[in-house]
Image (cartoon, grey):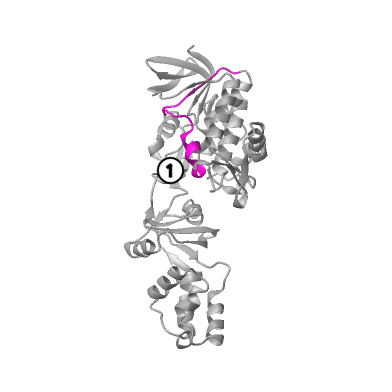
């Protein structure tokens, strides 16, 4: 068979979702993927348990040059809708903090669920297939591989972004969009650990493995979640979140004790426990290793009564308002998603179809839509995939 109603490029979360929905409408559907295994990004997500959605999904959890773009798709297919599908397949799941939903057992259950739904919808899936050409001929789209052309009325691009190249990420989708004259918002690594100068890196190495609840901010954007010191720099949810907003060359602010006014606590300690060692005072607020490191970095030692309020204020600021200047990020190798992508101003928010080319759809991570950490990017895949599947 070389003629299909719908051909989908990419068998990830968004691609499989659109295939299911188009197939349920009685459309003949072909899904093509270059990888040997289907849904690798699903399989490795959430520590192998797949954080498949978030019950707090809202448009304000997404970054795009067009912030209103996501609203229509998210309302057409909600987090509750996907949860209903998971329940229908009797997949046990649990809620972690901040509304994140994970499989109790394995991410493979989500892949199996999607493949079973594809099978029921009579979807044909080709894996380990290298596409050599995509184009238009006689008002139809064609995809060429194995020296054959396969034609379709609707072509859905669900090729993902550039994050995690070891599982096959590529710029295929961006190149294809540009081939059709569509604008690309510059792709950048997002939800990614940040890297720092050698001095700060040495500090991070000494504290490697230590985590704290921290409030990390860039300009007016703030995230208060866990932060982790690693031998490569700073990571953890709060850092990953802010990385999607941070601009190279700019500084970020870190509050290592967001629930405490350090200066007030140290003044209180000075009044009530004047002979207490300053490191001991700070160790009552922060993990001991971190407290010792900060006191050392600030050159502060001795009894707290011996320290002026000015010195205590400087020490407090290094905890409540620590300013750091990242030198970069770890890049796509460890980035969970890609910022930027196909310009959403050139796509219908109602249908996911190109405004320039009828029948050409873009869904998932290839678009300029990036969710926060915590299941939002998967929900965008489900929602955008569902919508394309209704119109392709």
Q: Which region is colored magenta? A: 27-47
State which quadrant residue 289 falls in: bottom left
State the residue at coordinates (55%, 87%): 271
User: Given the current orientation, which residue lies at the most extreme left position?
Assistant: 198
Return the x and y of residue 219 as percentages of the image width and height.
51, 60
- Whole-percent x and y of residue 345? 54, 38
Q: Position of residue 6 (x, y in %)?
A: 54, 21
The secondary element bearing badge 1 is classed as strand
- In the displayed structure, would residue 227 be above or below residue 360? below
Q: In the rendered view, does 392 fall on the left or right side of 36?
A: right
Please say if 301 is above or below 180. Answer: below
Report the residue marked by disc 1: 186
Q: Residues within 10 Å of mark 1 (few under 14, many from 20)?
A: few
Q: Residue at x 53, y 37 (%)?
A: 107
Q: Nearer the viewer, residue 231 or 133?
A: 231
Residue 274 versus residue 216: which sits nearer the camera?
274
> Residue at image x 50%, y 37%?
42
Q: Is residue 277 magenta?
A: no
Compared to residue 250, the image places residue 174 above or below, namely above
Q: Is residue 217 above or below residue 378?
A: below
Residue 238 in sight from this viewpoint: yes
Q: Residue furthest front?
A: 105
The part of the image, by quadrant, that contains residue 180 is top left
In which quadrant of the rendered view does residue 387 lie?
Answer: top right
Q: Residue furthest top?
A: 1
Assign the C terminus to one quadrant of the image: top right
Answer yes or no: is residue 392 visible.
Answer: no
Question: Percent x, y for residue 260?
Answer: 57, 71
């Amino acid at each position: 068979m070389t003629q299909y109603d719908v051909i989908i490029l990419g068998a990830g979360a968004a691609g499989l979702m659109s295939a299911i929905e188009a197939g349920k409408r009685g459309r003949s559907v072909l899904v093509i993927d270059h990888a040997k295994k289907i849904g690798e990004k699903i399989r490795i997500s959430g520590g192998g348990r797949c954080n498949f959605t978030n019950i707090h999904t809202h448009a304000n959890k997404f970054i795009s040059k067009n912030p209103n773009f996501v609203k229509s798709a998210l309302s057409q297919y909600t987090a509750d809708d996907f949860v209903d599908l998971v329940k229908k397949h009797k997949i046990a799941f649990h809620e972690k903090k901040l509304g994140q939903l994970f499989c109790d057992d394995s991410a493979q259950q989500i892949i199996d669920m999607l493949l079973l739904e594809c099978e029921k919808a009579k979807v044909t899936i080709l894996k380990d297939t290298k596409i050599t050409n995509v184009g238009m001929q006689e008002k139809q789209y064609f995809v060429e591989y194995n020296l054959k052309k396969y034609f379709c009325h609707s072509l859905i691009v669900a090729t993902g972004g550039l994050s995690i190249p070891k599982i096959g990420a590529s710029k295929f989708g961006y190149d294809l969009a540009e081939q059709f004259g569509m604008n690309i918002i510059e792709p950048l690594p997002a939800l990614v650990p940040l890297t720092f100068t050698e001095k700060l890196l040495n500090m991070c190495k000494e504290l490697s493995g230590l985590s704290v609840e921290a409030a990390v901010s860039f300009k007016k954007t703030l995230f208060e979640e866990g932060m982790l010191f690693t031998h490569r720099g700073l990571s953890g949810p709060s850092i990953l979140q802010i990385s999607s907003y941070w601009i190279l060359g700019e500084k970020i602010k870190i509050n290592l004790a967001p629930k405490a006014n350090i200066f007030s606590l140290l003044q209180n300690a000075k009044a009530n426990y004047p002979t207490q060692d300053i490191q001991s005072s700070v160790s009552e607020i922060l993990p001991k290793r971190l407290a010792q490191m900060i006191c050392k970095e600030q050159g502060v030692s001795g009894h707290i009564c011996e320290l002026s309020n000015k010195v205590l204020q400087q020490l407090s600021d290094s905890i409540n308002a620590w300013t750091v200047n990242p030198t970069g990020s770890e890049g796509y190798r460890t980035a969970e998603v890609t910022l930027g992508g196909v310009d959403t101003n050139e796509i219908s928010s109602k249908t996911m179809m190109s405004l320039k080319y009828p029948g050409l759809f873009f869904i998932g991570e290839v678009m300029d839509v990036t969710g926060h950490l915590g299941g939002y990017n998967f929900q965008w895949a489900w929602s955008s995939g569902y919508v394309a599947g209704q119109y392709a």
